[in-house]
Image (tube, helix red, strand yellow):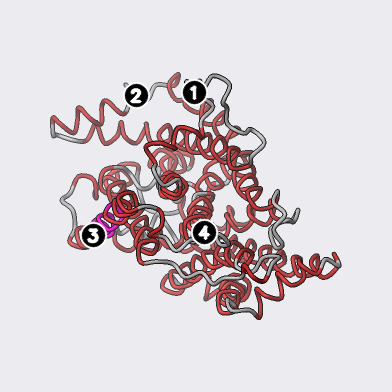
C-alpha cells in the first residue's frame, strides 16, 4: 500500500491545479446543464427501472409462481442476484473505511463513488428477498423482532436468514451515514457557490450549517474515524453472514467452512470490478482524468488481481476438500458442477474469475482504460456466474435422483434482474448530477499540504 501511495501522491501534488480549480472542476457537472451523454444514459436507466416496476407488479399480481422456482431449486435467480448485489457493495466500505484507517491517499479520488455504489447496490439487493416472500405486504415485517398480536411468536434467532436482516440493515445504515457525513463539506461548497435560491436552500439544508471552522473540522474527523472503525468489521462480517445462509445447511456443495473468507474475497473482487466500471466511464465523460488518474486505475487493477487469485485458490481448495472428505455426495456435487448440465456456467466462472485477472500482471493491461473497462465487465459476469453455480448446481441434483430437475429462469426473473440494473444506474446518474463525485475536501487537503 505504501508503494501504491508513493506512486499516486506526487501526481496530485505536482499538478498545476489550485484549490479554486478543484472546486470549479468538480462542481462543473452540478452547476452546468446535463450533457447529452448524461441524458441518454439516464433515459436508458429509466427504461430498465420501469421494467423493474412492471415485473415486480406482475410478480405480486400473479404470484411467485411466475418465477421458475420448484421444490428442488427453491432458490434461483432471486438469491443469486441478492448475493451478487451485496457483494458489489463491499468495495465502497473497503475503500472508505479500511484505507482511511491506513491513511492511504490514493483512495481520495475514488472513495465517494465507491461509497455511493455501496448504498445503491444494497438497495438493489433488498428487492430480491423481500419479493421472494410472495405477498410482501403480509410477510415483510415478520423478519423483524417486533411485538405482535400473538404475544409469544418471535422470529427464529438461530436462523442465518435472520442474521442477514440484522447484518445488512446495520451495514446499510452505517454506510449511508459514512457516505453522507463525508459529503457535508462538499455540499457546503456547492451551497456557497450556487446562485439559485432553491438550490441554496436544499444544499444549505443538507450541509447542516457547516461553517468550516477548526472546531467543525475536528469533530468531523473524529466522527469519520469512529464510523470507519465501525465499518471495518462490517466489511468482513456482512458477507460472512451471507455465506452462512449456505454454510450452515447440510446441502452438498454448501456445507463447508471455507465459505466465509471465500465470500469476503469474492465480494471485494466484484466490488472493485464495479468501481472500475463506473470510474472509467466517469473520468472520461466528466473530464476527471486529472483526478481519477491512471495510477488510481492501476492500483484498483492490482487489488482485482490479488482478490481474483484468492478466489481462484478457494475454488481449487473446494475441490480438494470434497475429494479429501471421502463423502460421495460432496464429491459428486463438485463433479456435477464441472461436468454436469451446467458445466458452461462453471467454465464461465473459472475463466472470468481465475484466468482473466491474471492479465493484470502486465502494466499495459493495468493502465489502459478501455481494456480495464472490458475486464471489469468480465469480472462481474464471472462473479454473477459464481453465485449461480453455488446456488443452482448444488440444488438441482440433491440426494434422491427422483427429485433431480433443471432450472431455467422465467422472463419475469430476468426482467427483475435487469430492472435492478436500471435502479442502480438511475441512482448513480442522479448522484453524479447533483452531488460531487470526487471528494473535494480531501483532494484540497493534498494541495494545501504542498503550500
x then y, percent, for residue 315: 70, 67
Circle 2 sits on which residue?
210
Q: Quadrant of residue 184?
A: top left
Which of the marked residues, 2 or 3, is nearer the chain's N terminus? 3
Mark 3 and mark 4: Cα distance apart in space? 23 Å
Q: Is residue 227 above or below residue 47?
A: above
How many marks on residues?
Answer: 4
Which of the marked residues, 2 or 1, is nearer the chain's N terminus? 2
Q: Nearer the viewer, mark 4 or mark 1?
A: 4
Mark 1 and mark 3: Cα distance apart in space? 44 Å
Circle 4 sits on which residue?
80
Q: Is residue 368 above or below residue 172?
A: below
Secondary structure of residue under mark 2: loop
Q: Is residue 147 above or below residue 89?
A: above
Mark 2 and mark 1: Cα distance apart in space? 12 Å
Mark 4 and mark 2: Cα distance apart in space? 42 Å
Mark 4 and mark 1: Cα distance apart in space? 43 Å
Circle 3 sits on which residue?
47
Which of the marked residues, 4 or 1, is nearer the chain's N terminus? 4
Amino acid at each position: 500500500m505504501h508503494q501504491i501511495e508513493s506512486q499516486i501522491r506526487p501526481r496530485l501534488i505536482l499538478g498545476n491545479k489550485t484549490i479554486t480549480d478543484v472546486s470549479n472542476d468538480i462542481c462543473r457537472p452540478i452547476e452546468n446543464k446535463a450533457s447529452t451523454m448524461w441524458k441518454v444514459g439516464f433515459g436508458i436507466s429509466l427504461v430498465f427501472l420501469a421494467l423493474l416496476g412492471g415485473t415486480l407488479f406482475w410478480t405480486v399480481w400473479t404470484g411467485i409462481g411466475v418465477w421458475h422456482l420448484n421444490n428442488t431449486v427453491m432458490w434461483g435467480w432471486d438469491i443469486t442476484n441478492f448475493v451478487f448485489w451485496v457483494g458489489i457493495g463491499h468495495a465502497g466500505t473497503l475503500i472508505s473505511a479500511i484505507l482511511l484507517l491506513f491513511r492511504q491517499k490514493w483512495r481520495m479520488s475514488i472513495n465517494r463513488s465507491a461509497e455511493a455504489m455501496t448504498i445503491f447496490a444494497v438497495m438493489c439487493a433488498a428487492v430480491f428477498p423481500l419479493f421472494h416472500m410472495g405477498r410482501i405486504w403480509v410477510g415483510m415485517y415478520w423478519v423483524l423482532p417486533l411485538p405482535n398480536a400473538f404475544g409469544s411468536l418471535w422470529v427464529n434467532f438461530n436462523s442465518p436468514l435472520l442474521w442477514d436482516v440484522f447484518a445488512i440493515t446495520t451495514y446499510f445504515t452505517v454506510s449511508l451515514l459514512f457516505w453522507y457525513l463525508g459529503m457535508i463539506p462538499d455540499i457546503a461548497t456547492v451551497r456557497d457557490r450556487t446562485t439559485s435560491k432553491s438550490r441554496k436552500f436544499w444544499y444549505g439544508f443538507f450541509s447542516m450549517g457547516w461553517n468550516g471552522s477548526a472546531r467543525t473540522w475536528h469533530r468531523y474527523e473524529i466522527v469519520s474515524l469512529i464510523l470507519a472503525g465501525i465499518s471495518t468489521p462490517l466489511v468482513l462480517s456482512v458477507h460472512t453472514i451471507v455465506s452462512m445462509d449456505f454454510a450452515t445447511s447440510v446441502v452438498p456443495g454448501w456445507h463447508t467452512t471455507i465459505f466465509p473468507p471465500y465470500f469476503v474475497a469474492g465480494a471485494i473482487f466484484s466490488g472493485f470490478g464495479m468501481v472500475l466500471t463506473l470510474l472509467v466511464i466517469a473520468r472520461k465523460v466528466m473530464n476527471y482524468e486529472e483526478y481519477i488518474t491512471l495510477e488510481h486505475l492501476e492500483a484498483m487493477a492490482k487489488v482485482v488481481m490479488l482478490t481474483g487469485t484468492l478466489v481462484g485458490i478457494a475454488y481449487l481448495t473446494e475441490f480438494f476438500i470434497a475429494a479429501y472428505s471421502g463423502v460421495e455426495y460432496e464429491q459428486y456435487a463438485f463433479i456435477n458442477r464441472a461436468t454436469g448440465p451446467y458445466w458452461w456456467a462453471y467454465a464461465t466462472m473459472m475463466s472470468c474469475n481465475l484466468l482473466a485477472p491474471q492479465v493484470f500482471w502486465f502494466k499495459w493491461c493495468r493502465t489502459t482504460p478501455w481494456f480495464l473497462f472490458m475486464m471489469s465487465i468480465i469480472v462481474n459476469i464471472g462473479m454473477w456466474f459464481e453465485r449461480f453455480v453455488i446456488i443452482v448446481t448444488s440444488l438441482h441434483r440433491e440426494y434422491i435422483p427422483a427429485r433431480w430437475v433443471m432450472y431455467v429462469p422465467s422472463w419475469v426473473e430476468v426482467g427483475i434482474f435487469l430492472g435492478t440494473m436500471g435502479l442502480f444506474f438511475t441512482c448513480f446518474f442522479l448522484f453524479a448530477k447533483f452531488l460531487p463525485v470526487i471528494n473535494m475536501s480531501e483532494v484540497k487537503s493534498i494541495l494545501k499540504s504542498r503550500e
